[in-house]
Image (cartoon, grey):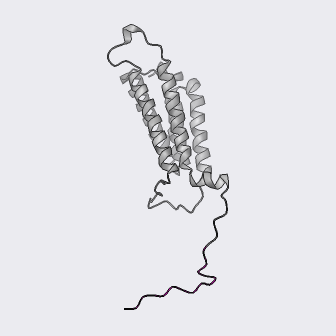
Amino acid sequence: MTTPSAPAPGPETEPQSPAAPRTPLAWLRDHSELGVCALLLTLGVLVLTDALTMDVDLTQRGPVGPKTVPVVVGAALLVVAVLLAVDVLRGGRGQAEAGEDVDLSEPADWRTVLLLSGVFLGSAVLIEPLGFPAAGALLFWGAAYTLGSRRVDRDPLIAAVLSLATYGLFDKLLGVPLPGGPLMGVL
């Protein structure tokens, strides 16, 4: 039996020199999931702070009071944030998205993100003077237009129906008061 001989030392077989020290920016780029950890940690702290400072009368208490669910959710957010941070720092990596219509080599579409943000903020500003039905219709229609729908004959109608249905569901059925605006007397 023949055993392969070791190659003669040469330029292609010499040991590699240690890698150059990495910059903090490169380290952060490789550990970008820590941003999600920071977000979860912040949300957990906010939820717990809000839940623990909630003023609850003794008459509203029971075995499970209004603080129970927020405290559980806040604590769970903190636990998940810590576990995810430990996993990321130990070298864990999230799987790359494998969607069939996603080209990961293309840059992000910031125009769409900014337009959607503008539509959302615009509807938040207009909800008080116009009421939820009108502001919601603008939100639904603006989002559909921003995401590529150009059917100006049906999109406003669908947006109005969705907005009125949402208003009716929350305001009338669930008892969550939403501003009706000028349509308050009509609806």
Which residue lies most toward the bottom here?
1
**Residue sitting at 45 percent across and 87 percent down?**
4
Q: How many marks?
A: 0
Residue at 44 percent of width and 13 percent of height: 56
Residue 13, above or below 141? below
In reply to whether residue 111 is colored magenta, the answer given is no
Q: Is residue 157 visible?
A: no
Q: Quadrant of residue 76?
A: top left
Visible residue check, residue 76: yes
| Chief SS of the magenta region | loop
The residue sitting at 42% across, 23% down in the picture is: 171
- Choose between 129 and 4: the one closer to the eye: 4
Q: Position of residue 175 (x, y in %)?
A: 39, 20
Task: Name the quarter where the N terminus is drawn.
Answer: bottom left
- Of 187 and 73, the residue lying toward us: 73
Does residue 7 belong to the magenta stretch?
yes
* Residues drawn in magenta: 1-15
Examine the rendered structure and indicate whether residue 18 appears above or below residue 85. Answer: below
In this orientation, which residue lies closer to the viewer: 99 or 89? 89
